[in-house]
Image (tube, rainbow, N blue to C red):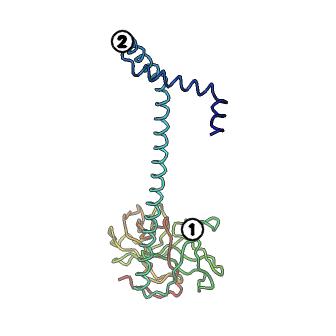
Amino acid sequence: MRNFFIALVRHKDHVAFLFSFIISISLLLSNNSPRMLVVRGAALQVFNIIYSPVSWTKSMFIVEEENKLLKERIFLLTLQNEKMSAMANENSNLKTMLNFKDDTDLDILPAKVINKGMHPNLLSVSLNVGANDGVKINQPALTANGVIGKVIEVGKNSCIVQLMSDLNYRLSVKMLPSGATGILQWLHTDYCIVNEVPKNVKIEIDDTVVTSGFSNIYPGGLPVGKVVAVFDERWSSQKSVHVQIHSDLGGLQYLFVIIKAEPYDFN
């Protein structure tokens, strides 16, 4: 109690001002005379003028904070959706690979893409399998949809695959049901061209394209793509065929390496 009185004495000026202010406000609010009503109205106007910028600033601050929180929530939701979509896509790819491995008679080794474009001067991917897993140079690489390239370098636990999209890549193919053969090479996006096809052979849109088997690397009958266009070459006995490949080379995550090449029954 003694400390309380000492504090009152020490701050007597502030206490007196506060006491006087409270009494003045009480008198202002309780007096209903016409003159006092005018004074009260003027005081409220002054108060509103002074308080309005403060209120506006406070409102803007609240809006900015709410916008910031909303943007953070949208960003987090976007990340979650992208992660869930990626996981669903990966799960679908793994199921497709598992089904393909169970259905095929090929001796294939599952592999995961661990890097892209590691080999200079050609388009390639690196895989997490190598010599310790039975991988050798020139073994074919494919997805459940079809051929995508061949092994060109092998380490103990990794290897490099040259992709079909590399301009130096060549593949001997056959078109079904005609049985016409030719050399396939990359054209653009997911399209390839087959040159040196005899003009007198009937080839139609949507004909199936598979490996010909005329190679020491690729067994015959591996799926490659489908015919999307046929062009007769003037003053020549040959024509060119445009082929859309089945595999998505840009989105490769998992694939197979054929460890032992045996003829593949496409049908």
- Labels 2 and 1 touching (C-beta < 8 A): no
**Label 1: element kind:** loop
Q: Amino acid at mark 1?
A: Asn
Q: Is residue 185 above or below residue 153?
A: above
On the image, the x and y values in percent for residue 159 come to 61, 77
Q: Is residue 11 above or below residue 34?
A: below
Q: Is residue 240 above or below residue 101?
A: above
Q: Which residue is mark 1?
A: 168
**Label 2: element kind:** helix
Quarter of the figure with the N terminus: top right
Question: Label 2 neighbourhood size at 10 Å, few (<14), some (14-19), many (20+)?
Answer: few
How far apart are the two marked residues, 2 and 1, measured between alpha carbons? 100 Å
Q: Quadrant of residue 135?
A: bottom right
Q: Is residue 178 above or below residue 232?
A: below
Q: Amino acid at mark 2?
A: Pro
On the image, the x and y values in percent for residue 11 come to 64, 29
On the image, the x and y values in percent for residue 196 come to 45, 70
Mark nearer the viewer, 2 or 1: 2
Decide which of tag 2 and tag 1 comes sooner along the chain.
2
Q: How many marks?
A: 2
Q: Quadrant of residue 241?
A: bottom left
Identify the residue at horizontal 36%, vertical 13% (top origin).
Answer: 33
Identify the residue at horizontal 49%, vertical 50% (top origin).
Answer: 72
Quarter of the figure with the C terminus: bottom left
On the image, the x and y values in percent for residue 230 come to 37, 65
Identify the residue at horizontal 53%, vertical 84% (top origin).
Answer: 216
Give me the disc on residue 142.
none
Q: Which residue is mark 2?
A: 34
- Using residue 72 as the reference point, say whether residue 41 is left or right of it: left
